[in-house]
Image (tube, rainbow, N blue to C red):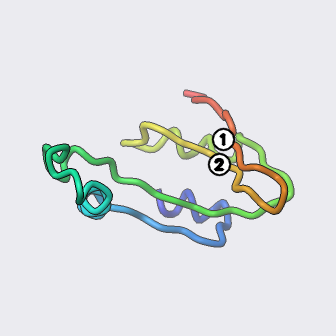
Amino acid sequence: MGRALAALEPEELGYESREQAWAKFKGMLKDRPDLLTGDASNMPESWRAVVTAVWFDCEQLAPLWKLPGVDQVTVLQLPEGDRPGAKIACGDPR
């Protein structure tokens, strides 16, 4: 996954393990321990790549969908200045 994302030439590339996601989740719910059930195995692993480009084509993501273990690919356009952010619907080409 890291190599496939690196091919997009991201400005930032990061990985979050199940354990890191669980720790972050527990931190978010520190005032509501009654909502914390399960353990790190309930959390997804995730990758994050920040790509700055004038033009974006969902076809660039096609190799990601073919990798084992990939359940979801989400593309977000981050807000900038007066322009709001948006979720870009690329769809699942499988």
> As drawn, which residue projects farthest toward the bottom?
11
The location of residue 13, given as percent across then percent down, is 54, 68
**The C terminus, quarter of image:** top right
| Residue extending farthest front | 31
Disc 1 secondary structure class: strand
| Residue under the image location 32 percent in, 58 percent down | 28
Q: Horizontally, is 27 left or right of 59 in the view?
A: left
Q: Position of residue 87 (x, y in %)?
A: 66, 41
Q: Which mark is residue 87?
A: 1
Q: Nearer the viewer, residue 18 or 80?
A: 80
Horizontal arrangement in the rendering, residue 44 relative to residue 53 (left or right): left
Q: Which mark is residue 76?
A: 2
The earlier-in-sequence mark between 1 and 2 is 2
Query: Which amino acid is tagged 1?
Result: Lys
The numbered dot on residue 16 is: none
Please tell me in which quadrant of the rendered image residue 22 appears.
bottom left
Q: Locate residue 67, reporting x and y percent.
A: 45, 44
| The quarter of the displayed image where residue 4 is located | bottom right
Question: Do labels 1 and 2 touch, CB within 8 Å?
Answer: yes
Q: Nearer the viewer, residue 75 or 70?
A: 75
The structure residue drawn at horizontal position 43% and vertical position 41%, both measured from the top left corner, is 70
Place residue 10 in its image quadrant. Answer: bottom right
Q: Residues within 10 Å of mark 2 (few under 14, many from 20)?
A: few
Is 70 placed above or below 26 here?
A: above
Kind of residue sitting beneath label 2: Leu
